[in-house]
C-alpha cells in the first residue's frame, strides 16, 4: 500500500480530531495498490455526509426486539461503510468522520437527538468502526499466522523479522491511540460492558501497560470518561499498572469510581501502599465533612494539584457546585468502603428499562405475574416518580384494569421489602413439580426450614455439627440477593444437607445472629462447604456482616466445578470420563487436562448446564433475577433457593459414589483445592487497629501527590 500525492508517505491524512479546524474544506485522496491494480477513493465532505446518512438508514432499518431495542448487526453495518477503505487509512477516515460530525448535524438537525439502543450518532458510528477495524486487523493477523503454519519446522525469527514485528506492533499501537483519543471521553450506554468489548476488539491485550498509561494521562487532563477509569480500576490485569495514587485522587475528584471499584483495587496492593490509600481516603472524607474555612482552603489547594479539576480552584461558582457533588460522592464511597448501608437507589434509566421489559415479558408469556409484580413494586418504591410511567405503559398497551390497580395503589414507607403476596400463588407448595419434563424437584423426604428466629437457628447449628461428624461431611451453599438495588447485600443464605435444607433469612435476623451463622458455618473446618462460583456470594454476605472474619478466611470451602474436575481428572487417568468437557480447550499432550483447567471449563458452562451434564436432569432458573429482599418470600422463590443448594449435594453424592468404586477418599482428594483466604478490606477494622494499619503521615502522602 502506498499513499500518493503528498510526498510524505507516512504522514496521516488527518491528524487528531481537535486539530482539524475545517474538515468541510478538506478532500481526502486514498490510493490502494494491490496486485498492480489501483483503487482511488475520495472522501470529500459529500462522501462523509453520505456515510453518516447510510449509517442512520441502516440502523433505522434494523428490526426491533420484543423489549423495543433494535436488533442491530453492528459489524455488518460497519462493513458496509468501511469495506472499501484501505486498511492503512481506516483510522484516518474515522478521524475525518468524527471531525465532520458537527458539520453534519448542522445540516441534519433531525439527527441531533437521534439514538439507537441509547447510542448517539457519534457513539454508534464508533461502535460500527471499532467492530469492523477488529475484523480488518484479524484478517491480516490470520494471513500472517497461516504463513507460519505452512512451515513444517520450528520457526526461529531473524533479527530483521523481530524488528519488523516490533515495528508493526508500534504502528498498531500508534493507530490504537488515535482511536482511543476519540473513544476515551465518550460515555457509552452499558459502559462497563462496552469497554470490555472494545478492549477485545482493539486487540489491546498485548498493550495492557500502555493502555493504562494512556488512560492515566487522559484522566489527569480530565479527558477520560468515568466508565473507562472504572474499567481500569476494576480489572486486575489492568489495575496492576496503576502505580500512582494520583490516578485514584483524580478518579475521586471526577466522580468516576465507586466504593466497590476502589476496594477491588486496594485489595491487590502491598501493605505500605494500602496504608497510604487508607490515610488518603480518610483525608478526602474529612474534607467533605468539615465546614470551617481552613478545610475549604485546603480543598481548593487539593483541587489545584490535579490538572483534571484545577480550573475549578479559581472559579468559585463552579468550585462550589463541584464540591457539593464531590462531597456526596465521597460520603457514598466511604459508606461502601466501611460496609455501611448505602443510600444509592436504582439508576433511573435502568429502572425504566427494567419496568418496561418485565411488563412486556409478562404479557408475552415469558415471565409470571408474580415476578412482574415484585419487580415493578420494588422499583417504584425506590423511584416513586416512575409510578405514572408504569400506569402509562399499561394503558398504552390496553391493560386498563392493571393500570387502574397501580394508579390507585398507595405506597407506604418500608414497602420496598414488605411486598404483599398475590393469591393464589403460582405454585401451591415448594414440592410442586414443573411443567417441563425431567426437571429437578425437591424430594418429599427433604425438609425445608426458613430460619428467621432463635429456635430454628439453634436447630440448624446442631444439624451442622452432626453433619460435620458424619460419613458425609458435605453441605451445599448458595446465597441470593436482589438484582434491582445497587450495592445489594445477600438477603438469603441456603445450606443443604443430605435430607434437609435451611434457608436463612438474613434480612430478618439481627446482625449479631447473622455473624453467628457465618462463624458456625464457614468457621467449621470439618464441615465441607460446596458452592458454585461462590466468590461473589461471599462478597454479598460480607455486606451483611462486615466484621465476620470467617467470610474472608472461610474454612473448607470449595467450588463444585473443582470437585467434579478432580473426579474427571482421575477418570482420565483410567481412560474414562464422568462428564462431557467443552471441546474449545485444547488437550494436553498426554490427552488430559489438569484439574485447574478442567474446573475453569466447567465454571464457564453455568450451574444449570453443569447439573444437566452431570446429573442428566434440568435445573429451573426462572427465579434467578427475583426480588430476593421481598418479604414474605413466595413459594416459587423458596423452591428455587432450596434446589440451587440441594443440587450441589446431589452432585457431591455422585462424585463420592464414583471415587468409592476406585477405592479413593473424596475428602482427601478435594482438600488441596479449598478456597484460599481473601485479603481483608481496607476498613475492616472499625477502630483503625494500628496492628493492621499503623498511622501514616497524611502530609507525606499529599507531598508525594503534589510531586510532578
Image (tube, rainbow, N blue to C red):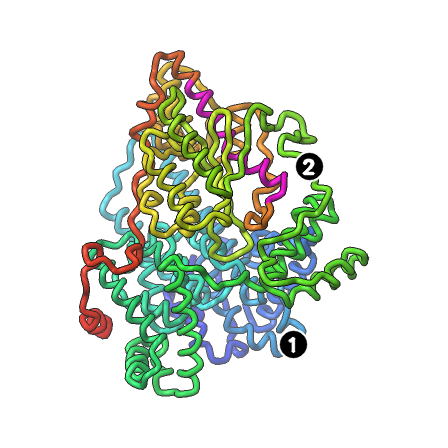
Q: Which mark is residue 427?
A: 2
Q: Is residue 651 magenta?
A: yes
Q: Secondary structure at mark 2?
A: loop
The residue lying at 48 percent from left, 37 percent from top is 456
Which residue is at a point 38% across and 35% down the rendered structure image? 149
Q: Residues within 10 Å of mark 2 (few under 14, many from 20)?
A: some
Coordinates of residue 314 in the picture (x, y in percent): 35, 87
Q: Residue furthest front?
A: 455
Above or below, 41 against 155 in this view is: below
- Left or right: where 434 falls relative to 527: right
Picture layout, residue 42 above or below residue 526: below
Residue 591 x, y percent position in the rendering: 37, 22
- Quadrant position of the C terminus in the picture: bottom left
Lower position in the chain sequence, tag 1 or tag 2: 1
Q: Is residue 608 magenta?
A: no
x, y (%) of residue 697?
Answer: 18, 69
| Mark nearer the viewer, 1 or 2 | 2
> Residue at 30% of width from left, 39% of height from top?
676
Q: Secondary structure at mark 1?
A: helix
Q: Which residues are magenta?
A: 633-656
Marks 1,2: beta carbons within 8 A: no
Q: Find disc 1 in the rendering and name its residue.
A: 109
Picture disc at residue 29: none
Pick whichever, 508 or 395, lies toward us.
508
Q: Which x, y percent locates residue 31?
A: 48, 62
- For the residue pair 137 and 642, the one nearer the viewer reads as 642
Q: Is residue 150 visible?
A: no
Q: Is residue 87 left or right of residue 241?
A: right
Using a 10 Å C-alpha cutoff, classify the residue at mark 1 as few (fewer than 14 neighbours), some (14 to 19) or many (20 or more).
Answer: few
Foreground: 585 or 31? 585
Amino acid at each position: 500500500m502506498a499513499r500518493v500525492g503528498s510526498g510524505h508517505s507516512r504522514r496521516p491524512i488527518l491528524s487528531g480530531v481537535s486539530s482539524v479546524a475545517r474538515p468541510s474544506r478538506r478532500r481526502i485522496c486514498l490510493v490502494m495498490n494491490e496486485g498492480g491494480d489501483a483503487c482511488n477513493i475520495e472522501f470529500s465532505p459529500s462522501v462523509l455526509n453520505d456515510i453518516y446518512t447510510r449509517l442512520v438508514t441502516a440502523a433505522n432499518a434494523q428490526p426491533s426486539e420484543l423489549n423495543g431495542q433494535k436488533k442491530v448487526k453492528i459489524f455488518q453495518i460497519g462493513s458496509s461503510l468501511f469495506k472499501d477503505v484501505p486498511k492503512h487509512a481506516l483510522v484516518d477516515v474515522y478521524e475525518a468522520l468524527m471531525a465532520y460530525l458537527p458539520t453534519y448535524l448542522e445540516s441534519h438537525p433531525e439527527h441531533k437527538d437521534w439514538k439507537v439502543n441509547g447510542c448517539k450518532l457519534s457513539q454508534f458510528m464508533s461502535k460500527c468502526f471499532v467492530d469492523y477495524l477488529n475484523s480488518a486487523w484479524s484478517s491480516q493477523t490470520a494471513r500472517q499466522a497461516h504463513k507460519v503454519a505452512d512451515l513444517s519446522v520450528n520457526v526461529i525469527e531473524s533479527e530483521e523479522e523481530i524488528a519488523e514485528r516490533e515495528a508493526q506492533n508500534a504502528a498498531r499501537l500508534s493507530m490504537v491511540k488515535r482511536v482511543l483519543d476519540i473513544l476515551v471521553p465518550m460515555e457509552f450506554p452499558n459502559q462497563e460492558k462496552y469497554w470490555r468489548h472494545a478492549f477485545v476488539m482493539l486487540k489491546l491485550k498485548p498493550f495492557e501497560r500502555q493502555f493504562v498509561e494512556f488512560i492515566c494521562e487522559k484522566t489527569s487532563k480530565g479527558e477520560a470518561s468515568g466508565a473507562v477509569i472504572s474499567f481500569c480500576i476494576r480489572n486486575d490485569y489492568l489495575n496492576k499498572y496503576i502505580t500512582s495514587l494520583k490516578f485514584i485522587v483524580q478518579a475521586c475528584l471526577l466522580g468516576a469510581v465507586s466504593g466497590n471499584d476502589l476496594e477491588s483495587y486496594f485489595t491487590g496492593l502491598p501493605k505500605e501502599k494500602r496504608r497510604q490509600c487508607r490515610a488518603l481516603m480518610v483525608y478526602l472524607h474529612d474534607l467533605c465533612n468539615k465546614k470551617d474555612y481552613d478545610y475549604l482552603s485546603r480543598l481548593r489547594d487539593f483541587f489545584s494539584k490535579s490538572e483534571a479539576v484545577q480550573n475549578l480552584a479559581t472559579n468559585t461558582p463552579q468550585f462550589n457546585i463541584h464540591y457539593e457533588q464531590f462531597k456526596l460522592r465521597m460520603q457514598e464511597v466511604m459508606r461502601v468502603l466501611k460496609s455501611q448501608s448505602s443510600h444509592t437507589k436504582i439508576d433511573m434509566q435502568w429502572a425504566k428499562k427494567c419496568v418496561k421489559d418485565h411488563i412486556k415479558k409478562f404479557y408475552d408469556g415469558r415471565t409470571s405475574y408474580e415476578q412482574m409484580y415484585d419487580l415493578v413494586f420494588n422499583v417504584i418504591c425506590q423511584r416513586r416518580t416512575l409510578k405514572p410511567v408504569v400506569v402509562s405503559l399499561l394503558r398504552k398497551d390496553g391493560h386498563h384494569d392493571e393500570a387502574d390497580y397501580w394508579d390507585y395503589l398507595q405506597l407506604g414507607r418500608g414497602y420496598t421489602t414488605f411486598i404483599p403476596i398475590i393469591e393464589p400463588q403460582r405454585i401451591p407448595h415448594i414440592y410442586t413439580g414443573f411443567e417441563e419434563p425431567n426437571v429437578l424437584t425437591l424430594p418429599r423426604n427433604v425438609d425445608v426450614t426458613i430460619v428467621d428466629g432463635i429456635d430454628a437457628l439453634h436447630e440448624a447449628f446442631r444439624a451442622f455439627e452432626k453433619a460435620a461428624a458424619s460419613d458425609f461431611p458435605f453441605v451445599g451453599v448458595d446465597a441470593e440477593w436482589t438484582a434491582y438495588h445497587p450495592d445489594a447485600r445477600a438477603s438469603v443464605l441456603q445450606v443443604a444437607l443430605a435430607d434437609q435444607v435451611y434457608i436463612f433469612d438474613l434480612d430478618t435476623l439481627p446482625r449479631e445472629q447473622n455473624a453467628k451463622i457465618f462463624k458456625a458455618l464457614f468457621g467449621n473446618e470439618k464441615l465441607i462447604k460446596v458452592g458454585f462460583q461462590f466468590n461473589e456470594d461471599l462478597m454479598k454476605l460480607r455486606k451483611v456482616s462486615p466484621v465476620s472474619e470467617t467470610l474472608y478466611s472461610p474454612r473448607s470451602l470449595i467450588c463444585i466445578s473443582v470437585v467434579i474436575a478432580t473426579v474427571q481428572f482421575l477418570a482420565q487417568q483410567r481412560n474414562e470420563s464422568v462428564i462431557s468437557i467443552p471441546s474449545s480447550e485444547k488437550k494436553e499432550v498426554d490427552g488430559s487436562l489438569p484439574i485447574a483447567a478442567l474446573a475453569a471449563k466447567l465454571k464457564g458452562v453455568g450451574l444449570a448446564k453443569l447439573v444437566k451434564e452431570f446429573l442428566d436432569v434440568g435445573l429451573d432458573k426462572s427465579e434467578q433475577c427475583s426480588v430476593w429482599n421481598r418479604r414474605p418470600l413466595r413459594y416459587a422463590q423458596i423452591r428455587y433457593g432450596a434446589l440451587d443448594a440441594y443440587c450441589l449435594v446431589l452432585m457431591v453424592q455422585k462424585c463420592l459414589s464414583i471415587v468409592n468404586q476406585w477405592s479413593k477418599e473424596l475428602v482427601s482428594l478435594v482438600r488441596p483445592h479449598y478456597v484460599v483466604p481473601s485479603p481483608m478490606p481496607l476498613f475492616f477494622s472499625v477502630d483503625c487497629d494500628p496492628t493492621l494499619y499503623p498511622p501514616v503521615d497524611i502530609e507525606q502522602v499529599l507531598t508525594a501527590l503534589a510531586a510532578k
